[in-house]
Image (cartoon, rainbow, N blue to C red):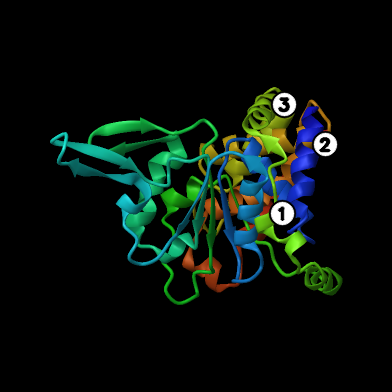
Amino acid sequence: MSDIEIYQKLFANIEKVIQGQSTSIRKLLAAFFSNGHILLEDVPGTGKTTMAKALAKSIDVDFQRIQFTPDLLPTDILGVSIFNQRDQDFEFHPGPIFSNILLADEINRASPRTQSALLEAMGERQVSIERNQYKLDELFFVIATQNPVEYHGTYPLPEAQMDRFAMRFGLGYVSEEEEIAILDGQNELNSVENLTPCINKEDVIRLKEQVNKVNISDEVKHYMVNIVRATRETEGIINGASPRASISLMKAAQALALFDGLDYVTPDHVQEIAVTVISHRIMMNSQSRFSGNSSEQIIENILSSIPVPI
């Protein structure tokens, strides 16, 4: 299969069970193939968990799911050493984090202490447990879901945790016609449980390597950096986006360009993904929040104010 065929085949497989969400699937795959992690934030019932499971079941790799709850402990994620009486020594039992695709379901229902167990893994693809370091697989990918922070029993994710996610977006409600199609498709054949892998680990690694080879002109690089730097100078923002945002924006734009059959990034690719990549990384002051501004709207305003390279 060619690079485009790998993407199209995976996209079509996910779309069998996630209808009316082509834009969200495109963003999901852009993060996946550019070594980013995803945070899906929306109200319950919009398909966040289904989308995560559809991605995992479409690829022939190891998949683990963690249901985050208030009593979840870091060891439930990382693993624990248990004393082996026969060998008179401690034996390490790896936790679910030692997988390729990890679904952190309702991540903001666990305590900040438990949430922080993912920080090192997401940032460096390794975990430190009892003075030992364990490398994670090169295909390690976290797709987390969370309910809006206004919901009961939720803990807001700390800024350091948010910054580890390459993108944050919601699925939203589908149109009336698409919702009727969802009802019509509620049979065993269209169930996410019946999805079978359509690509393998080697296909994923190959496509990731091709993403890194997509060219970016100096003008487009300056354009991306100007967008991110503007968040540090805009009124109403306490903390702007870090250089990690610039890196995530560049890599996601490279993936989108490859999906479109191009070997170079255009400003359109940057604009398509900028809000999704940057909006969750900025911290607004109280006056800006109470005046009704949203982080997404602020990034939209920045995009409209910065000259687009021709």
The alpha-carbon separation of the residues under discs 2 and 3 comes to 15 Å
Q: Depth check: 37 or 92 in front? A: 92
Tell me the quarter of the picture where residue 290 sits: bottom right
| Residue holding disc 1 | 24
- In the image, what residue type sits under mark 3? Ile
| Residue holding disc 3 | 216
Residue 241 is left or right of residue 71, and the answer is right
Relative height, residue 110 to residue 64 (above, below): below
Residue 146 is left or right of residue 161, and the answer is right
Q: Residues within 10 Å of mark 3 (few under 14, many from 20)?
A: some
Spot occupied by residue 251 in the image (x, y as percentages of width and height): 64, 34
Q: Residues within 10 Å of mark 2 (few under 14, many from 20)?
A: some
Residue reaching furthest to the bottom: 152
Residue 36 is left or right of residue 106, and the answer is right
| Residue holding disc 2 | 260
- In the image, what residue type sits under mark 1? Ser
Q: Residues within 10 Å of mark 1 (few under 14, many from 20)?
A: some
Q: Which residue is painted at 79% across and 47% down in the image?
A: 12
